[in-house]
Amino acid sequence: MIVASIITCPHCAHQATEIMPENACQYFYVCTFCGEMLKPKPGDCCVFCSYGTVPCPPMQQGIDCC
């Protein structure tokens, strides 16, 4: 399982490598550059599935986490 993901802010395009929680989805993320609070896109379970390079661990394991 991959736990690191590069998350890209859709507002300022800043990228940051973050460690994802292994047993849960992360619904909110505050951009470390512009301070914008990110929420998942409609239909996604978390910010990593919406804006990250790797889906969250529950999705990688095929677990419906929504």
Image: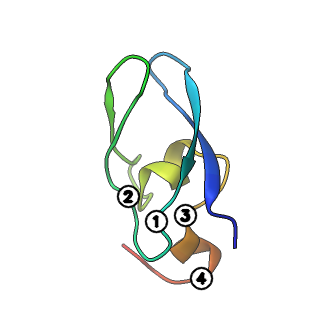
| Marks 3 and 4, the one that precedes in the sequence | 3
Q: Which residue is mark 4?
A: 62
Mark 1 → mark 2, Cα distance in angstroms:
7 Å
In the rendered image, the vertical position of residue 62 relative to residue 60, given as above or below: below
Number of the label disc, if any, that sits on residue 21 = 1
How packed is label 3: few (under 14 Cα within 10 Å), some, or many (20 or more)? many
| Marks 1 and 2, the one that precedes in the sequence | 1
> Residue at coordinates 39% horizontally, 48% vertically from top-left?
40
Confirm or deny contact between disc 2 and disc 3 (CB under 8 A): yes
How packed is label 2: few (under 14 Cα within 10 Å), some, or many (20 or more)? some
Number of the label disc, if any, that sits on residue 26 = 2
> Residue at coordinates 41% horizontally, 46% vertically from top-left?
41
Q: Which residue is mark 3?
A: 56
Where is residue 43 shown, x and y percent of the image? 42, 58
Confirm or deny contact between disc 3 and disc 1 (CB under 8 A): yes
Mark 3 → mark 1, Cα distance in angstroms:
8 Å
Where is residue 7 shown, x and y percent of the image? 56, 39
Amino acid beneath label 1: Pro
Confirm or deny contact between disc 4 and disc 1 (CB under 8 A): no
Where is residue 42 shown, x and y percent of the image? 38, 51
Front-most of residues 43 and 16 = 16
Mark 2 → mark 4, Cα distance in angstroms:
16 Å
Secondary structure, mark 2, is: loop
